[in-house]
Amino acid sequence: MNNSPPTLLIVDDDPSIRLSLSHVMSEIGYCVRSAEDGLSALREIQNEVPELLLSDLNMPNMSGFELLSVVRRRFPAIRTIAMSGSFSGDEVPSGVAADGFYQKGCSIAALLRIITLLPNVERPVPRPSNPETPLWIRSDAHDPSSDGYITITCPECLRSFPLALGTDYPQHKTVCIYCQSPIYYAVFQADDEMPSLSFQLKTAAPKLFPPSASNLSY
């Protein structure tokens, strides 16, 4: 029988709220960590996946709206509670990907009741992938020497950003400008066929990212 305390991640940009909630929930028996915004929370989740996530909705850098959406897609086993002072009642606000809602200012007893009543929803867990498997990105630039740009969507935080098109190496490595996660990617031209699966598997091998490759951008 597992007697370890339940794990909880509290996300709020207000230090006083993080501190007070962390203290109370720790006293109750939770193993608590905290984060100041959605991007920090994703880094915490990558280090260790909590059983329960309690997140404010209005935060800088990455809001709770975005965070809860990413968590629902990438970590569906985490039970989630949105919290805010901008909404009232106990219904999850429309469009928020959370299992429950806690109105800021209500009692801890109310929060514990919400946790107790969270539904046990079985969601399919995404199949893990090799982080070095490249994203295959279609480019419309016919001149490989031109200063074209591609759009990359980070597989970790699901945010998109533009990146200057690489030229003389079939695959590249960059980092997400938001969450700083490493991203491997490969580019093929719009008039080319999508590379075959066997080629993708071969090029996904770490040996194709030699340390001496001068055009790897970090």
Image: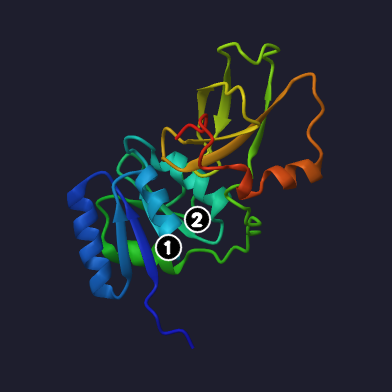
> Camera-side residue: 175 or 45?
175
The image quarter containing residue 204 is: top right
Secondary structure under tag 2 reads loop
Q: Is residue 37 above or below residue 116?
A: above
State the colouring used for the structure image: rainbow
* Label 2 sits on residue: 99
Query: Residue at horizontal 24%, vertical 60%?
Result: 21
The image quarter containing residue 5 is: bottom left
Q: Residue 138: give x, y in percent of width and height.
A: 69, 25
Residue at the bottom extreme of this rendering:
1
Disc 1 versus disc 2: distance between alpha carbons?
Answer: 20 Å
Residue 97 in view in this figure:
no
Query: Residue at horizontal 41%, vertical 40%?
Result: 180
Q: Residue 3: give x, y in percent of width and height.
A: 41, 84
* Label 1 sits on residue: 48
Q: Is residue 184 above or below residue 168?
A: below
Q: Amino acid at mark 1?
A: Glu
**Is residue 31 shown left or right of residue 168?**
left
**Is residue 208 shown left or right of residue 28?**
right
Q: Residue 143: give x, y in percent of width and height.
A: 67, 11
Q: Residue 90: give x, y in percent of width and height.
A: 41, 52
> Camera-side residue: 159 or 77?
159
